[in-house]
Image: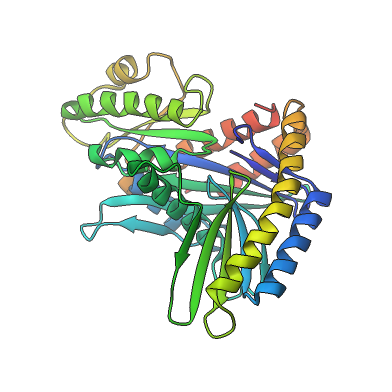
Amino acid sequence: MSLINYASREINCKIVYYGPGLGGKTTNIKYVYKQIDPSARGKLVSLATEADRTLFFDFLPLDLGQVQGFKTRFHLYTVPGQVHYDASRRLILKGADGVVFVADAQRERLEQNIESLENLRVNLISQNLDPETIPFVMQYNKMDLANVMSSEELEQQLNPKGYLSFEAIAVEGIGVFDTLKAISKLVLKAISEGR
Amino acid sequence: MLQDGLIMYEDSFEKINLILDELMKNSKSECVFLVDKSGQLITMRGNMEQFDSTAFASLSAGNFAATSELAKLIGETEFSVLFHEGVKDSIHISIVAGSIIMVVVFRVVKTSLGLVRLEVKKSVEHLAHVLKEMVERSKRDGQIKKLDESFTQAIENEIDSLFKD
């Protein structure tokens, strides 16, 4: 749910990184945090287990600065990917303006990707968000590994509707900013069209 | 209650801030935040220098959401008030108009939980009225185009220059 504040002249949007466990959602956010100008980012909050697995969420606020007198902020969230944290995932989707699905491109993870996509659809509906219209970008991560599916296969299996998609190696930063740029623009477009 | 985004207008913003200032004064608290359920900070009043307010807002919403789920597990709709007790500072969290989270931070030596609760209760009614008006207006205006093309273009340029390796 975007918040446009005419009094403090701010626009705030929420983008959620979704996907199966160990797919690279947190890695995406951590790379953004590391690379971006420190004046444009806030504190990175990670609610993780001792083993560094996301327990509740990661949160990173990004500040685009003043554009025509308005401060625009993107709040990036990740969900915990592990199956048993479904209740937490549902909560984090609350009020999302856009979703990035971080798929693990390894062949043996195909089933988990499909399950997680279906879980996303169910959870969006539970938050009164329309899976058909919410701004959505697909990222195929870990493309450097040996056992990955080809991008054609991935598109066919995970993205039959042809949403914008990017190949990534998040741990090296490849594809991370392309994905973020794409989802940010889609979210702003949706807000500007009053959707 | 709110799905299409919230638009905050200057007059509503002033009214809300006045109510929060009054609450802060009467309850002798340090600061008050209003946060929406998605974790966006709507406004804050008081001495906030020691906090990262954005992180505070996001965590408050997460906290509220998690406890609401706990409530549902035992057959409640949600817990309308949460209280976290610290050694020096404590936090009182409550829900306004069903959709907005209000967080009051107060010094244990300066005031009491009872007084904070009492003053919060009084303010919630006034706030609910202003918020209801604002939400209805937001919904009406949500139908029209919110940002013009030159603005969207300017933001896109900003995104291109900031989000790069």
Q: Please report the residue visible at 43 percent of the width from the left and 34 percent of the height from the top.
A: A100
Residue B31 on image: x %, y % = 63, 70
**From what the image shows, is residue A93 above or below residue B48?**
above
Residue A90 on image: x %, y % = 39, 37
Q: Please report the residue visible at 63 percent of the width from the left and 32 percent of the height from the top.
A: B4
Q: Choose between B58 and A68: the one closer to the eye.
A: B58
Label total for image: 0
**Taking A159 as reference, is A137 left or right?**
right
Q: Choose between A68 and A59: the one closer to the eye.
A: A59
Residue B76 on image: x %, y % = 41, 43
Q: From where the camera sits, is residue A100 visible? A: yes
State the quadrant of the C terminus of chain A: top right
Q: From where the camera sits, is residue A173 visible? A: no
Residue B22 on image: x %, y % = 74, 68
Q: Please report the residue visible at 40 percent of the width from the left and 30 percent of the height from the top.
A: A123
Q: How is the protein colored in the picture?
A: rainbow
| Name of the residue lying farthest toward the bottom | B109
State the quadrant of the N terminus of chain A: top right
